[in-house]
Image (cartoon, rainbow, N blue to C red):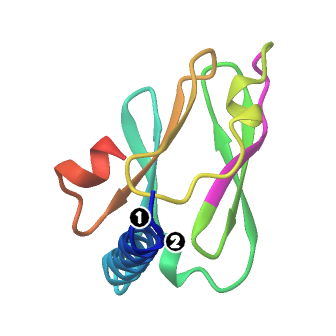
Amino acid sequence: MTKMDKILMLGVLLSGLIALFLVKGFHSQGQSVVAIIQVKGDIVETIDLSKVEKAKDLHIQGAQGLSIIEVENSRIRMVESPCPDRVCINRGWIERSGEAIVCVPNEIVIKIKGNDESIDDITQ
């Protein structure tokens, strides 16, 4: 491998990284991200996460009891739930379109939708 080959490979790699950052930056600009909270399939709360200025807790009554959901600017998570395995709590924060938290025993679903959700958003 010659010195020129190495320079060419480095240039292609840097160009690719710059293009990736530009695409990610343009993709996320101006996107409204909405969290939809459902209990037993019915929507009980819809929150525009991009407009949340102050952290807050939501108390949602599910099939087995009370769940506490924490909302911050651009993200949401389940903090407490009466379910035995705590899978929904261990899921942690979600903030991107297509992500979800599901508490099967308590029948609560939190999912994120963006205003420009497309095939590419779903496959990420």
Foreground residue, 74 or 6? 6
* Quarter of image, res 41: top left
Q: Residue at x 78, y 14 (%)?
A: 85
- Residue at horizontal 37 percent and vertical 37 percent from the top: 42
Q: Nearer the viewer, residue 109 or 116?
A: 116
> Quadrant of the image for the N terminus?
bottom left
Residue 51 location (% of width, % of height): 51, 83
Q: Horizontal and vertical percent for residue 57?
A: 75, 61
Q: Which residue is mark 1?
A: 34
| Marker disc for residue 49 | 2
User: The residue under label 2 is which amino acid type?
Assistant: Leu
Residue at (61% x, 63% y) in the render? 75
User: For residue 102, what is the image quadrant?
Assistant: top right
- On screen, residue 13 above or below 44: below
**Residue 115 in the image, given as x and y percentages of width and height:** 26, 69
User: Residue 7 has which mark?
Assistant: none
The residue lying at 37 percent from left, 47 percent from top is 124
Disc 1 packing (10 Å; few <14; some 14–19; many ≥20) = many
Q: Position of residue 20 (x, y in %)?
A: 38, 71
Q: Taken as a whole, is the magenta stretch helix, strand or loop?
A: strand
Pick the front one: 63 or 108: 108
Relative to 58, 37 lies left or right = left
Nearest to N terminus: mark 2 or mark 1: 1
Query: On the rendered structure, is 100 left or right of 90?
Result: left
Which amino acid type is shown beneath numbered disc 1? Val
Q: Write the start and end of the magenta stretch as one range.
A: 76-83
